[in-house]
Image (cartoon, rainbow, N blue to C red):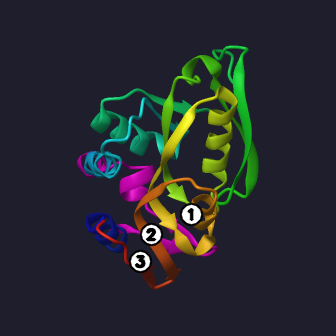
């Protein structure tokens, strides 16, 4: 998605440790009209796939997950990073390592929200090493749900998560793939017709 690449170049910042900050429009402050455009692009990419539910993880995945769900007219579920008292006792649970935060945490979803009758599209803001998506895939597997694929706003192609997921047979559609980045540049992978 050329517009996303241009926005990253205009508004993104590269921090040490291969961190790309896009908080001004994607995961702290939300550029709502642009987010809705990204949702429409994901809808286009998965046109004709019989998806019943969107699944993401709190908190940064919620905005893009909501935009995709709105574009597709589907319910969205998000995995919580902390068990709270308002969750049912029957939980789907998986452990995820966060590259950005350098820590592991459990993600949980009430089993009533994902079932064997669902065809799930996993959506997230970033794909680095693939850990969050692996955790969400695990939740779907526990529920017996089918997975249509994963849609990601920004993939850090150089960190290998997308390659690993694709090698496992998971369809991954990324709106922008960063091939490399340094303090003064971000280089994108040339994609087919995105």
Q: Which numbered dot is residue 22?
A: none
Q: Residue at x 36, y 55 (%)?
A: 25
Say which residue label 2 marks. 177
Q: Secondary structure at mark 3?
A: strand
Q: Position of residue 42 (x, y in %)?
A: 34, 49
Q: Residue at x 50, y 54 (%)?
A: 171
Is residue 47 a member of the stretch shown in magenta?
A: no
Image quarter (top left, top right, bottom left or bottom right) of the C terminus: bottom left
Q: Residue at x 69, y 16 (%)?
A: 85
Image quarter (top left, top right, bottom left or bottom right) of the N terminus: bottom left
Q: CA distance from mark 2 to mark 1?
A: 9 Å
Part of the protein shown in magenta: 11-35
Say which residue label 3 marks. 188
Q: Secondary structure at mark 2?
A: strand
Quick check: marks 3 and 1 in contact, CB under 8 Å?
no
Quick check: marks 2 and 1 in contact, CB under 8 Å?
yes
Q: Residues within 10 Å of mark 1 (few under 14, many from 20)?
A: many
- As drawn, is 43 to the left or to the right of 176? left
Say which residue label 1 marks. 162
In terms of sequence position, does the residue under pointer 3 or pointer 1 come before the other? 1
Tell me if I can see residue 81 in this picture.
no
Quick check: marks 3 and 2 in contact, CB under 8 Å?
yes
Question: Which mark is in front, 3 or 1?
Answer: 1
Q: CA distance from mark 3 to mark 1?
A: 14 Å
Q: Residues within 10 Å of mark 3 (few under 14, many from 20)?
A: some
In terms of sequence position, does the residue under pointer 2 or pointer 1 come before the other? 1
């Amino acid at each position: 998605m050329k517009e996303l690449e241009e926005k990253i170049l205009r508004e993104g910042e590269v921090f040490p440790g291969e961190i790309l900050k896009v908080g001004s429009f994607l995961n702290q402050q939300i550029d709502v009209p642009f987010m809705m455009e990204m949702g429409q692009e994901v809808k286009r990419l998965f046109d004709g796939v019989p998806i019943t539910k969107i699944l993401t993880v709190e908190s940064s995945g919620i905005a893009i997950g909501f935009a995709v769900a709105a574009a597709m007219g589907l319910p969205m579920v998000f995995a919580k990073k902390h068990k709270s008292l308002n969750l049912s006792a029957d939980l789907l649970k998986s452990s995820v390592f966060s590259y950005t935060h350098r820590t592991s945490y459990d993600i949980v979803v009430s089993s009533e929200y994902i079932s064997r009758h669902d065809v799930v599209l996993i959506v997230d803001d970033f794909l680095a090493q693939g850990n969050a998506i692996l955790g969400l895939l695990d939740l779907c597997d526990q529920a017996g749900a089918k997975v249509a694929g994963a849609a990601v706003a920004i993939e850090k192609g150089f960190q290998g998560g997308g390659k690993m997921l694709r090698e496992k047979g998971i369809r991954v559609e990324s709106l922008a793939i960063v091939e490399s980045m340094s303090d003064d540049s971000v280089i994108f992978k040339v994609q087919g017709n995105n």
